[in-house]
């Protein structure tokens, strides 16, 4: 009887979260019908004329849509891949540190940026990367002319990717550090007896041992290839870098909300949702196939 009451208590505790999930995730999906209408707020959903797939065909014809999709794919994919590489490398190197106090201090310093808002970090980056900022001052010592990091389309995506790597790799490294702690220490002892150095132990013991974790994280990251981080880009970009910095989320905000083209904005959002659902299915299949990870 006590066990049943405890189980019921756990279910009741999950109710507020489920209510918020339904209210802010599933209920708005019913308004996706706007994508098939020429919607105007004055007429509302009920009285706005239906246009079928015209909004989707319109997106296929305009250059902006393809440009935004390419920017999103480029930025998000490189973020996933490079954060994975940097996080794994950092975890392997930190695992070799023998002083526990130094290890904890380094770990704390690198994952602390994860908890900072992009509103704060964007202000810091704008100050550092300004024409009269610290970065350009340092480059000036070597005779390099000031570089408009946030105002040059060719450079802006790399600023976005690099700053996101700096912010997130430390937090992701925690996953790999946890996996490294589960490795049997006798494997390292046997390797030392066979004359293996630290690099060889890292390559032939540590890396293969956490390979399932790496595969799992990488496969689950596939579902985020269309998420380039709205908060980060919105707080850093400007009209001059729209050609390389505008992504799906900022495009929906700019076109759908600021310009009042609600049907076009909803169409882009609906397409992103459908593609993301497909990618989530693919990522879970890969995780189940290669990392033996299942949620059902």
Image (cartoon, rainbow, N blue to C red):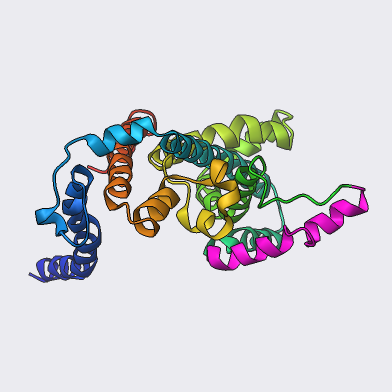
What segment is highlighted magenta in the picture?
Answer: 116-143
Q: Is residue 97 above or below residue 219?
A: below
| Residue 9 shows in the view | yes
Q: Quadrant of residue 27?
A: bottom left
Q: Position of residue 268 (x, y in %)?
A: 33, 43
Find out whether residue 135 is within the magenta segment: yes
Image quadrant in which you'd find residue 273: top left
Residue 280, above or below 131: above
Residue 169 location (% of width, % of height):
58, 50
The quarter of the rendered structure image containing the C terminus is top left
Q: Position of residue 275 (x, y in %)?
A: 31, 36
Describe residue 152's horizontal placement relative to residue 270 as left or right.
right
The picture quadrant where one finds residue 7 is bottom left
In reply to whether residue 284 is colored magenta, the answer given is: no
Side of 106 where 3 appears, left or right = left
Q: Please tell me which residue is depicted at 21% across the width and 35% down the height of the picture.
A: 53
Which residue is the extreme one toward the left? 1
**Residue toward you, 186 or 22:** 22
- Magenta stretch secondary structure, dominant: helix
Task: Count every numbered label the image shows and give the total.
Answer: 0
Residue drawn where x is 16% and y is 37% of the image: 52
Q: Is residue 278 visible?
A: no
Q: Is 154 located above or below residue 24 in the figure?
A: above
Residue in view at x 11 percent, y 71 percent: 5
Query: On the rendered structure, is 224 left or right of 48?
Result: right
């Amino acid at each position: 009887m006590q066990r049943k009451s405890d189980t019921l208590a756990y279910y009741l505790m999950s109710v507020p979260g489920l209510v918020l999930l339904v209210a802010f995730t599933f209920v708005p999906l019913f308004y996706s019908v706007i994508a098939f209408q020429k919607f105007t707020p004055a007429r509302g959903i009920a009285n706005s004329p239906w246009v079928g797939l015209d909004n989707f065909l319109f997106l296929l014809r305009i250059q902006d849509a393809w440009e935004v999709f390419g920017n999103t794919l480029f930025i998000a994919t490189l973020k996933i891949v490079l954060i994975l590489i940097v996080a794994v490398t950092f975890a392997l190197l930190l695992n070799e540190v023998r002083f526990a106090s130094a290890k904890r201090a380094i770990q704390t310093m690198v994952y602390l940026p994860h908890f900072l808002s992009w509103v704060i970090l964007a202000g810091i980056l704008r100050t550092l990367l300004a024409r009269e900022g610290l970065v350009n001052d340092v480059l000036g010592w070597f005779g390099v002319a000031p570089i408009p990091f946030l105002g040059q389309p060719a450079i802006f995506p790399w600023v976005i990717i690099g700053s996101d790597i700096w912010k997130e790799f430390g937090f992701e490294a925690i996953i790999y550090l946890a996996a490294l702690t589960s490795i049997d220490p006798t494997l390292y002892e046997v390797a030392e007896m066979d004359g293996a150095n630290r690099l060889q132990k890292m390559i032939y013991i540590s890396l293969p041992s956490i390979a399932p974790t790496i595969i799992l994280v990488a496969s689950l990251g596939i579902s985020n290839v269309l998420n380039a981080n709205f908060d980060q880009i919105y707080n850093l970009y400007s009209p001059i870098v729209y050609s390389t910095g505008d992504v799906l989320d900022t495009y929906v905000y700019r076109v759908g909300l600021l310009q009042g083209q609600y049907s076009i904005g909803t169409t882009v959002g609906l397409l992103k949702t459908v593609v993301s659902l497909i990618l989530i299915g693919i990522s879970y299949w890969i995780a189940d196939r290669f990392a033996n990870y299942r949620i059902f």
